[in-house]
Amino acid sequence: MQGYSISIDLTAHENTTLNVENPELIDAAYIWELDDYKAKIEIKGKQKGETDLVVTDHETGESATIKVKVTEYPMPRLAVKQPKGNIFDTMNFYLYNEDSKSINSNSLSVVCDSIVWTVDEINNSFRVFEHEGVGNRLTLEWGHCFKYPGEYKTNLTAWKDNKVIFRHQLAVTITDEKDFLEYNWKDITKNSSAWSTYADVLKSGPNLMTTYGLCGTVPYTEVRVFNGNMTQSYQLYDYFCKLYSVPTYEDNRDKMWQLYDELFSEQKVYPSAYPVAIWVTERVNIVLLLLDDNTGYSNYVVYAEPNRQ
């Protein structure tokens, strides 16, 4: 089998050689012991296939041919703990062997150079295995949050010498069934003491963080760009346009102030912030706000409350 070794005992002289017909398939070593002409041949499978191994004892002139068949290494498969989740849920992926044996990084390093995890229509990849010089790096389990609903095809691909040698595909379903992102309004009964960030091993962006709380009796959620820079307003705007469509309201300054007051509660967290764009859906009112926090640069937040109409 690929990555595994076997030993063959024999009686031969020290001056014995091995000739492998196809050295890409196996490594073979002759080990001779002085006592009673005992010797052995160690064979390690590298790639799937069949080859001849010719053993020649130059003291006697005798030779023998050993037929070697290397079977395919059981490559790890891709699995997920829950095949369906909501946007911003952590989808936990992991590797497993069909024969339930543990996954050995040393054996993998013989079979392939790297194994990567990808998702169709999302750029970038995540390396779950990589052979690095004399060492190996193996990740058996990882989490990823999808920020848009849809049917996603995820792929586990093994590479050897810049060629694909194995691929396993797994589909997951991501929905948008909660009131707003990962939250249901009925579950918000107190103020959060922290911001939540989300696993994104593919670096697919945007890198969002959220928090929640109560303004009086009205639940709310905030969304910001983690480590936001000068493009944060565009990242927030583009994300919610893609998630919900273009804003319901995006007009002159006076009308936006009026709509902001009409659509959101009197207890809203940011009563003096400027409303850049407003989205109105069946379950939630969302506003992109420009904050005046006297920091000298623009700071943006998305603020959401239940649609009370």
Image (cartoon, rainbow, N blue to C red):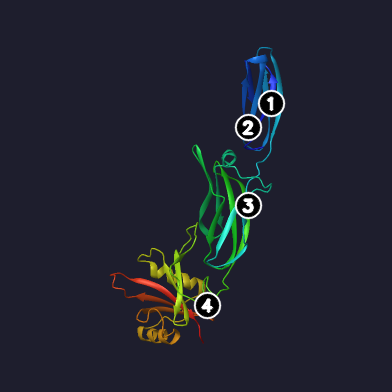
Q: Disc 3 or disc 2, which is closer to the eye?
A: 2
| Left or right, 38 with reference to 205 | right
Q: Which one is nearer the viewer's eye here, 271 or 18? A: 271
Front position in the image: 293 or 26: 293
Q: Nearer the viewer, residue 116 or 306?
A: 306
The image position of residue 28, as x and y in percent, is 62, 27
Q: Secondary structure at mark 4?
A: helix
Label 1: few (<14), some (14–19) or many (≥20) C-alpha neighbours in 10 Å: few
Tag 4: Cα neighbours inside 10 Å, few (<14), some, or many (≥20)?
Answer: some
What residue is at 56 percent from the left and 53 percent from the top?
141
- Front position among marks 2 and 4: 4
Disc number lying in front (3 or 4): 4
Q: Which residue is mark 1?
A: 8
Marks 1, 4: nearer the viewer: 4
Q: Residue 86 lies in what quarter of the image?
A: bottom right
Work out how far the residue at label 1 is from the one at label 4, CA to CA, in angstroms.
69 Å
Left or right of 133? Residue 75 is right
Residue that badge 2 annotates: 44
- Relative to residue 277, is residue 122 depicted above or below? above
| Amino acid type for the residue under numbered disc 3 | His
| Residue type for callout 1 | Ile
